């Protein structure tokens, strides 16, 4: 997204991420344009033989919840909510602005 943070992937193998706390800390430490709109929570990152993160697969998946089995969250106001198929369709149809 031009001029805004799009999506961040966070490795959380222990399922210990507190989305409410994360949203609060991001809201206090980052300007609104720098906060990620979408958060994808994964078990672990795939890495190359040179220990770089394989980002192309994540980029190709985008934020379509029907394609992604990981947890997806959407920034709604000042909190992150679970990205459902309905919210996804609303974003695509322009009923929800990002």
Image: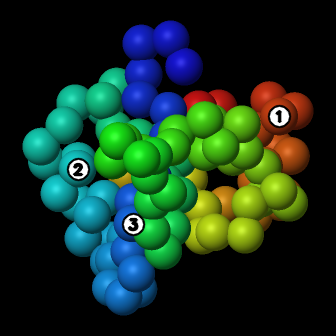
Looking at marks 3 and 2 on the same chain, the residue that comes earlier in the sequence is marked by: 3
Q: Distance from label 1 to label 3 (Cα)?
A: 27 Å
* CA distance separating discs 3 and 2: 17 Å
Q: Describe residue 29's horizontal placement relative to residue 86 as left or right.
A: left
Name the residue carrying label 1: 92
Mark-to-mark CA distance, 1 and 2: 25 Å
Q: Which label sits in the foreground, 1 or 3?
A: 3
Q: Horizontal and vertical percent for residue 81?
A: 54, 64
Number of numbered labels in the structure image: 3
Question: Image point 51% across, 43% down: which residue?
Answer: 54
- The image shows residue 85, relative to residue 38, as above or below, that is below
- Residue at the left extreme? 29
Secondary structure beneath label 1 = helix
Q: Which residue is mark 2?
A: 26
The colour scheme applied to this rendered structure is rainbow
Q: Residue at x 42, y 47 (%)?
A: 49
Residue 31 appears in which quarter of the rendering? top left
**Label 1: few (<14), some or many (≥20) within 10 Å?**
few
Residue beneath label 3, please? 11
The answer to whether one can see residue 73 in this image is yes
């Amino acid at each position: 997204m031009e001029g805004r943070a799009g999506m961040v992937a966070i490795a959380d193998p222990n399922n210990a991420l507190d989305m409410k706390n994360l949203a609060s800390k991001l809201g206090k430490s980052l300007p609104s344009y720098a906060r990620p709109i979408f958060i994808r929570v994964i078990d672990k990152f795939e890495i190359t033989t040179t220990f770089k993160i394989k980002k192309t697969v994540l980029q190709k998946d985008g934020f379509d919840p029907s394609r992604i089995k990981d947890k997806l969250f959407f920034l709604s106001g000042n909190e992150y909510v679970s990205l459902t198929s309905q919210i996804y369709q609303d974003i695509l149809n322009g009923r929800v602005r990002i």
